[in-house]
Image: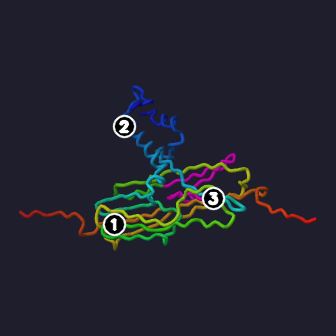
Amino acid sequence: MFWPTLRMGSWDPLAQMRRMQREMGRMLQDTYQGLTGEFPSMNIWTSDESVVLTAEVPGLRAEDLDLTVLGDTLTVRGSRRAEELKEGERYHRRERGTGEFVRTVQLPYRVDSAKVEAHYEKGILRVTLPRSEEDRPRKVKLHQ
Amino acid sequence: MSNERGDIQRRDPAGVSQSSEGLEEALLVPATDIYERDDALVLLADMPGADESTVDLNIERNVLRVSGHCACQAPEGHECVYSEYSCGGRYERTFTLSGEIDTQRIEASVSDGVLKVVLPKAEQAKPRKIEVKSG
């Protein structure tokens, strides 16, 4: 591996790592939609109490989305309508996907389906899934 | 360390943008549809997380620049365990307009994370029916 910008006195291995990470991230960002084929793109956050899932689903309405929770799986279903073009109208460029999608995600633990909350705002779906009571870690007291 | 940022900008000025706090943000390219109507071109761009207050349109010498900002929505007290898209970042994309667009009457709106720009055609560029006279 060559480091064309390496100079004495200014070299910081961590800075190089960060730069690489950033560049890799950008490359993936530019191509992920075409490569993974998965729609919608998702991010998942966890804590001991709950899982938060966000998904990029621009151009939908809340009623176009359908969520189901079973045990430790979440299924997101929906459809994105295409613009209806009238006769004589034509596309010059078409990059936004349309049609139906289904995506199932396995969560790190079972969730309490009754307490799941979902919001759709500015094209982003955000689902908060609290961990089910019986699945939480419990401290065991020691008796002497 | 002090010149790290300078290096990056020299090497790749388009790849890294900086917010007002000086932090680097992801630069995102919105997926875009463009279709033509009789009277206008319509541009639709996916910009999830952006709204009217953060989206900007700029026209300079027939180049339309669309930009927007998506604030990070990381939930508090949680750790990111899986990520397919950049949480927060700056959208930016430029389009070259033909001279047939009436730039004074461009209209734009954002709803559900989709930007819609209507670019009306200038009068002289609209299709015109020419009647054929007999005789």
Name the residue located 42 percent from the left edge and 64 percent from the top edge. A126
Spot the residue most to the right. Answer: B135
Spot the residue most to the bottom. Answer: A114
Residue B42 seen in the current view: no
Say which amino acid is labelled 2: Leu
Q: Does the stretch in magenta take in B51?
A: yes
Quadrant the N terminus of chain B occupies: top left
Q: In x, y percent, where is residue B120?
A: 71, 59
Query: In the image, is residue A17 above or below residue A83?
Result: above
Quadrant the C terminus of chain B occupies: bottom right
Spot the residue most to the top. Answer: A8
Residue B113 seen in the current view: yes
Secondary structure, mark 1, is strand
Say which amino acid is labelled 1: Thr
Q: Does the stretch in magenta take in B9?
A: no
Q: What is the magenta segment's predominant secondary structure?
A: strand
- Which one is closest to the eye, mark 1 or mark 3? 3
The answer to whether marks 2 and 1 sit on the same chain is yes
* Chain under callout 1: A
Residue occupied by mark 2: A14
* Chain under callout 3: A
Query: In the image, is residue A133 above or below residue B70?
Result: below
Q: Which residues are magenta?
A: B43-70
Numbered mark located on residue A73 in the image: 1
Whether tag 1 and tag 3 are in contact, CB under 8 A, the answer is: no
Give whichever of discs 2 and 1 has the lower sequence position: 2
Query: In the image, is residue B16 above or below residue B111?
Result: above
* Chain under callout 2: A
Residue occupied by mark 3: A91
Q: Is residue A106 left or right of residue B25?
A: left
